[in-house]
Each structure stands twice: as C-alpha cells, then as structure tokens.
Image (spheres, grey):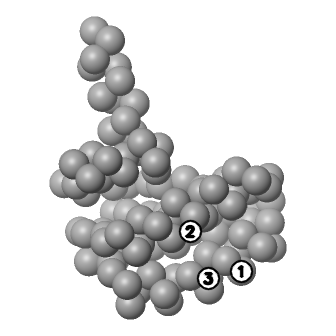
Amino acid sequence: MTSITIELNGSVGIAQASEYHTEINEALQAGNSLVFDLSETTEIDASTLQLMYAAKLFAEDSEATVDFENASEQLLQKLTDCGASSLLDTDEETTSETEQVD
C-alpha cells in the first residue's frame, strides 16, 4: 500500500479544502494511505477539519490509514480548544490522557 503525503500550508480554509478534496478522495479510492503533514499549517477551519475527519472515517472502513504529523503546539492547542484533537488522534490527546492519569 502506498502512502500519500498531503502538506497543508499556512491558514487552510474552505477554498483550500475544496482543492484538497479531489486529491484525498482519489488517493483513498485507490487504496492509498494518507499522511497530513501539518508542519507549515498555522490555522485550519471547520471545513478542513471536516474533510480530514471524513478521510479518517473512510480509511477506517477500508485497509487504508490516515495519519497526522508535525502539528505545532499552537495548532494542537487550537484543535484541543475546539474539541477536535481526539477526532484526529493527535499526540496531544495521548499526552493529555497520560497527564490526567499521573
């Protein structure tokens, strides 16, 4: 299985999400796994979150995977603030659970 990396750069909103939709859909339909590289992402809006979450749900129903890498602490905090970190299985969720147990 091939893994396709999608780099999200800067502030990603509805215009960019619609551009990524076709690329994501084609990759998953072909049975590829996806890696969202968030190293250059400063902000994402609800449409982008919805697109990434939908990709993750689609992958769960197939043999593909969707992973998220290199999110900045600032972006992780924004995801946590809006309740999306657990939806995207970011490392922040794991860290938070570990901190609560200790």
Instruction: Give amino acid for label 2.
Output: Thr
- The disc label shown at residue 26, or none: 1
Secondary element under disc 3, as helix, strand or loop, is helix
Residue most extreme to the top: 102
- Tell me which numbered mark, 2 or 1, is placed earlier along the sequence: 2
Measured along the vertical axis of the image, is residue 17 above or below residue 80?
Answer: below
Q: Nearer the viewer, residue 76 or 3?
A: 76
Measured along the vertical axis of the image, is residue 59 above or below residue 21?
Answer: above
Q: Is residue 57 left or right of residue 101?
A: right
Instruction: Give amino acid for label 1.
Output: Glu
**Rounded to the nearest whole Å, what is the CA distance between mark 2 and mark 1?**
13 Å
Secondary element under disc 2, as helix, strand or loop, is strand
- Tell me which numbered mark, 2 or 3, is placed earlier along the sequence: 2
Q: Quadrant of the C terminus?
A: top left
Secondary element under disc 1, as helix, strand or loop, is helix
The residue sitting at 37% across, 84% down in the picture is 14
Q: Which x, y percent locates residue 101?
A: 32, 12
Q: Which x, y percent locates residue 53?
A: 52, 60
Q: Is residue 40 left or right of residue 7?
A: left
Q: Nearer the viewer, residue 75 or 47?
A: 47
Instruction: Give amino acid for label 3.
Output: Glu
Q: Which x, y percent locates residue 66?
A: 60, 56
Q: Which x, y percent locates residue 47?
A: 40, 74
Q: Which residue is mark 3?
A: 23
**Residue 76 visible, this orientation:** no
The reply to whether callout 3 and callout 1 are in contact (CB within 8 Å) is: yes
Place residue 100 in its image quadrant: top left
Q: Which residue is mark 2?
A: 5
The reply to whether callout 2 and callout 1 are in contact (CB within 8 Å) is: no
